[in-house]
Image: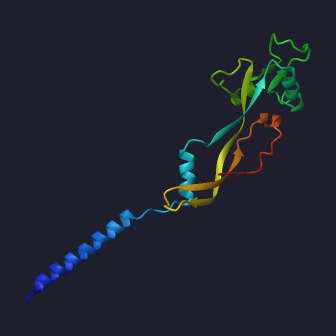
Amino acid sequence: TKKPLDIIHMIKNANSLLFMCAVLISGCSKKELSKEDALVLLQKKGNYPNAYTYEIYFKDSEDGRKMLDAGLEKDGLVKVQRNRKTGDNSGAVIEFTDLAKPYLLPPDEGQLSSVQKVKLADEVLSQIIGLTFNEQKDRALATYTTKFVGQTPFIKLEKKDFTKTKERV
């Protein structure tokens, strides 16, 4: 016959066994990726925020005309030389003022010396609108939207509508 102490040990061992099984089962189950987790993963991937830029050829009289048409000279961001013959690339047609300095970007490797990149805005992740998982549930395809923030005065150079969100996969 079993003693009461043996029965208590058996119950304790059974409870311990159940506890261990529960831990093993929960440890082996995969956590489903949430939209919030997907947003964090996309941000960690390093693509966002992303500077949306524009290249200005400061020796080009056509780009000088674009600066005037956009009102950037009136805004005090650039000075445009008007008495330049077509094809005369000896000096700058467009000069950037101190007001423009916060928006001027360093040149890319191999970029022409007569090109100045300017920042128009930052493209940031807005929201995850859908997740599609493969059969194994170990990969997901995210559909998300981005929006533009921190628009600079140079945004006038681009004809794009920066108020709309963009859907991406």
Q: Nearer the viewer, residue 67 or 89?
A: 89
Query: What colour scheme does the image use?
Result: rainbow
Apparent side of residue 12 relative to residue 93 in the rendered image (left or right): left
- Say if 140 sits above or below 56 in the image: below
Residue lying at 57% horizontally and 53% vertically, measured from the top left: 39
Quadrant of the image containing the N terminus: bottom left
Residue found at x 46% / y 62%: 31
Residue positioned most to the front: 135
Q: How many marks are shown on the rendered structure?
A: 0
Q: Is residue 24 left or right of residue 48?
A: left
Above or below, 2 against 49 in this view is below
Question: Of residues 123 and 79, which is closer to you in this image?
Answer: 123
Give the image location of residue 29, x and y in percent: 41, 65
- Relative vertical location of residue 89 with respect to residue 20 in this rendering, above or below: above
Q: Position of residue 106 (x, y in %)?
A: 65, 25
Residue 55 rendering spot, x and y as whole percentages: 75, 28
Instruction: Tell me which corner region of the image, top left, top right, bottom left or bottom right, holds residue 151.
Output: top right
Q: Residue drawn 16% across and 82% down? A: 8
Above or below residue 47? Residue 19 is below
Q: Quadrant of residue 3?
A: bottom left
In this view, the residue farthest toward the top is 90
Give left or right: position of 33 versus 129: left
| Residue 21 percent location from the top left of the image | 30, 71
Image point (77%, 26%), residue name: 56
